[in-house]
Image: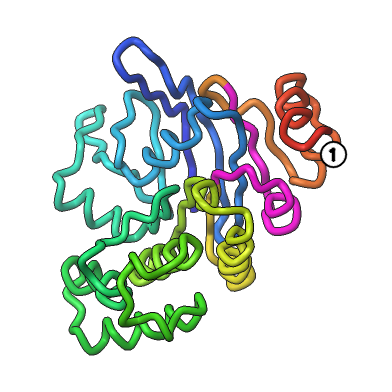
C-alpha cells in the first residue's frame, strides 16, 4: 500500500529526511517511533503531499504521490490532482483541527459533500454510521467546544474515515490528550486495525505498538534506523540508537 524510496526533505539548510526507505503492506499497521525532531511527522506529511519531497519517490497503492514521471523527470501534479490523491489518504493530527463553528455532524460531512460531491443525505447517513462506530452518535448536534479532548479526537477520526480512505495516517493522535482520555482514542484505532485498515501511526504509546501493530520502525536523524516485528524490536533492539531511545521511553 505504501512504498517510500530514498525520500529526502530539507527546510533551508536543515535536512530533515535523509533517505527514507520503507514499505507497508495493505492491511498492515505500522508504528513509527522516535524522538521529537527525528523526522516522523515530516515523513507522514510527505506521504499525502502536504510537504513536497526534494528527492526520492512515494507510492500509495501503486500510484506515485504528488508527481508525474515524464521525460525522465518528475513534474509536480496540479493542486486539483494532488487533492484527488490526498482525498484517498486520511490523516489525524495531534491537534484535532475541528471547525469550531460547525456541529460534530457537519464537521464529518463537510469534506465528502465539498470534495466528493456526495449528496447531503448520503453523507449524513455515512457520518452517523461512523459516529456510532466511534461511540459519539449522541453528540452529532454538539459543537466541538462541548466535547472532551478524547471526544474531539474521535470526531477527527470519523471525519477522516468519512472520505473512505484506503490509508490512514496518525500523527501522535493521543499526545495532546489527558492520560485518562488516551484509551478511548486507542480503542477506536484498535477497531480500525481489526477491520483491516492500513495505518501508519506515529506514536509514543509502546503498548499499542506492541499489541496492535504488525510492524515497527524506529526513526532517528531523518532515517529509518531499525525496523521489524514490534515484539522483537521492543524486546531485543539491535541498534544502539534504538536501545538508547527505548531505555528512555520504557526503561528497557
Q: Quadrant of the C terminus?
A: top right
Picture quadrant where residue 72 is located: top left
53 relative to 118, above or below = above
Q: Residue at x 48, y 51 (%)?
A: 170
178 relative to 99, above or below = above
Q: Position of residue 130 (x, y in %)?
A: 43, 79
104 relative to 240, above or below = below
Q: Residue at x 56, y 63 (%)?
A: 185
Does the stretch in magenta take in 77?
Answer: no
Q: Which residue occupies the foreground of this view, 129 or 30?
A: 129
Q: Position of residue 184 (x, y in %)?
A: 59, 67
Q: Which residue occupies the foreground of this view, 102 or 26?
A: 102
The magenta segment is 202-220
Residue corresponding to mark 1: 235
The kind of secondary structure element at disc 1 is helix
Q: Give the colour scheme of this rendering.
A: rainbow
Q: Residue at x 19, y 51 (%)?
A: 81
Q: Position of residue 158 (x, y in %)?
A: 41, 70
Left or right, 175 with reference to 107 = right
| Residue that protrudes farthest toward the front in the picture | 146
Amino acid at each position: 500500500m505504501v512504498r517510500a524510496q530514498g525520500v529526502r526533505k530539507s527546510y533551508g539548510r536543515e535536512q530533515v529526511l535523509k533517505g527514507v526507505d520503507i514499505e507497508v503492506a495493505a492491511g498492515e499497521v505500522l508504528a513509527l517511533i522516535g524522538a521529537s525532531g527525528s523526522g516522523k511527522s515530516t515523513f507522514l506529511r510527505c506521504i499525502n503531499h502536504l510537504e513536497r519531497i526534494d528527492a526520492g519517490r512515494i507510492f500509495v497503492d501503486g500510484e506515485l504521490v504528488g508527481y508525474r514521471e515524464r521525460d525522465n523527470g518528475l513534474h509536480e501534479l496540479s493542486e486539483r490532482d494532488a487533492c484527488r490523491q490526498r482525498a484517498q489518504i486520511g490523516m489525524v493530527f495531534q491537534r484535532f483541527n475541528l471547525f469550531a463553528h460547525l456541529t460534530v455532524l457537519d464537521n464529518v460531512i463537510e469534506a465528502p459533500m465539498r470534495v466528493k460531491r456526495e449528496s447531503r443525505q448520503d453523507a449524513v447517513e455515512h457520518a452517523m454510521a461512523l459516529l456510532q462506530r466511534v461511540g459519539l452518535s449522541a453528540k452529532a448536534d454538539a459543537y466541538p467546544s462541548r466535547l472532551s479532548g478524547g471526544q474531539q479526537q474521535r470526531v477527527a477520526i470519523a471525519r477522516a474515515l468519512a472520505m473512505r480512505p484506503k490509508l490512514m495516517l496518525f500523527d501522535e493522535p493521543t499526545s495532546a490528550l489527558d492520560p485518562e482520555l488516551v484509551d478511548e482514542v486507542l480503542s477506536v484505532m484498535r477497531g480500525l486495525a481489526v477491520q483491516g485498515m492500513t495505518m501508519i501511526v506515529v506514536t509514543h504509546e509502546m503498548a499499542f505498538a506492541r499489541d496492535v501493530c504488525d510492524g515497527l520502525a524506529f526513526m532517528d536523524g531523518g532515517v529509518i534506523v531499525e525496523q521489524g516485528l514490534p515484539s522483537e524490536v521492543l524486546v531485543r533492539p539491535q541498534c544502539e540508537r534504538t536501545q538508547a531511545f527505548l531505555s528512555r521511553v520504557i526503561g528497557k
